[in-house]
Image (spheres, helix red, strand yellow):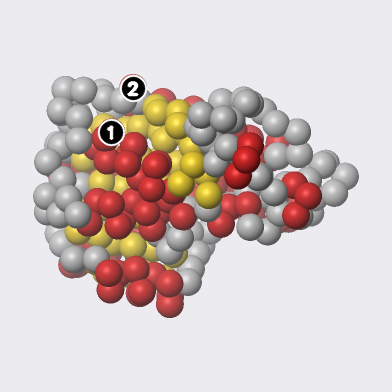
Amino acid sequence: MDLNNKIMVITGASSGIGMATARRLDRAGVKFVLNARSKGKLEALAAELGSAVCVTGDMIEPETPQKILDMAFSEFGRVDILFNNAGVMHIGGIDEVDIETLCQMVRLNFESVVRMSYLVLRHMKRQGSGFLINSSSLAGLKAFPEIGAYNGTKFAVEAFTDALRMELAGTGVKVTAIEPGRTKTELFSHWPEEKQFKPENGLIEADDIARCIEFILEQPQEVLIPRLLVVPARQER
C-alpha cells in the first residue's frame, strides 16, 4: 500500500504505540483521525502532524465509534486504515482484582474493537480496499498468571481478527493483528513497583512496534501478514 494521503483512524492515540504510529506514518504522508480520552494530549499530538483531526471520547461508550467515523467522513470522505489500539491491562490474582474493573477492560479491549471494526469495515468493503490492524499481544498467544482476564481479551482479539481475515478474503480489505511483547508504554504504569517490567529483562520502544506496523501496511496488495509477534530479544517468556 502506498501510504501517501491515506486516511487512518487510530484509537488510543495519545500515548504509547498509538502516538508512535501516528508520528512515524505522518512522515509517509498519512492523514489522521485520532481518538483518546485526553483532549490535551490528543490535540498536542495533532499539532505535530501534517494533517490530523481529533475525536475525544472513551471507546467504552457505544456512541464513540460512530462519532469517530462521522468525523472521518466529514473531514476526509473515507477511511483507508483503522488501527484498533485503545486498551488497558489490569493485573492481580483472582482474589485481588475488582470484577467491575475487569469487565471495563473487556469492554475496552474487545467490545470496542468489534464495534469499531464492524462500522468501518462496511465502508471499506464498499470501497473495495482498506486495512484493519488490531492491537493484540504476546498475551493473546499464551497465558500468564495474574493477567488472566487480559489474556482473555487478547485471545478474543486474535480469534476475531482471524475470522475477519477469512471472511474478507478477496474483497480487497486486509486484516492483521500486531502482537507486541514487553514494550515501554503507559500500559503498565499503574502496576505496583514490584511487578513492573525492568529494562534489564528486555523492553522495546513503542516506535519499534510502529515501524513493524509501517512494514505490514507497505506490503503489496497481494501480500498479507495476518499476524506479527514482536518481542524484545532478551524477553525469556
Query: Which residue is rendered at x = 24% and y = 51% of the image?
Result: 25
Query: Is residue 199 rendered to the left or right of residue 22?
Result: right
State the quadrant of the N terminus: top left
Residue 52 position by quadrant:
bottom left
- The numbered mark at residue 101 is none
Describe the element under mark 1 as helix, strand or loop: helix
SS assignment at label 2: helix
Asked if 137 appears above or below 99 in the picture, the reply is above
Instruction: Tell which tag, 2 or 1, sits nearer the viewer.
Output: 1
Quadrant including the C terminus: top right
Taking 25 as reference, is 53 above or below it?
Answer: below
The three-letter code of the residue at mark 2 reads Met
Relative to residue 13, is residue 108 drawn left or right?
right
Please say if 178 is above or below 105.
Answer: above
Residues at marks 2 and 1 touching, judged by CB atoms closer than 8 Å = no
User: What residue is rendered at 45% in x and 41% in y?
Assistant: 135
Of the two numbered discs 2 and 1 on the same chain, state the one appearing first in sequence: 2
**Residue located 12% across and 41% down the image:** 2
Q: Residues within 10 Å of mark 1 (few under 14, many from 20)?
A: many
Question: To which residue does mark 2 refer?
Answer: 166
Front residue of 159 and 35: 35
On the question of residue 200 being in view, the answer is yes
Residue 51, located in which quarter of the rendered image?
A: bottom left
Residue flagged by tag 1: what amino acid is it? Ile
**Residue at horizontal 36 percent and vertical 74 percent from the top:** 44
Q: Position of residue 191 (x, y in %)?
A: 71, 54
Percent across and percent down for residue 138 are 55, 31
Q: Is residue 58 left or right of residue 72?
A: right
Q: Which residue is mark 1?
A: 216
Q: CA distance from mark 2 to mark 1?
A: 18 Å
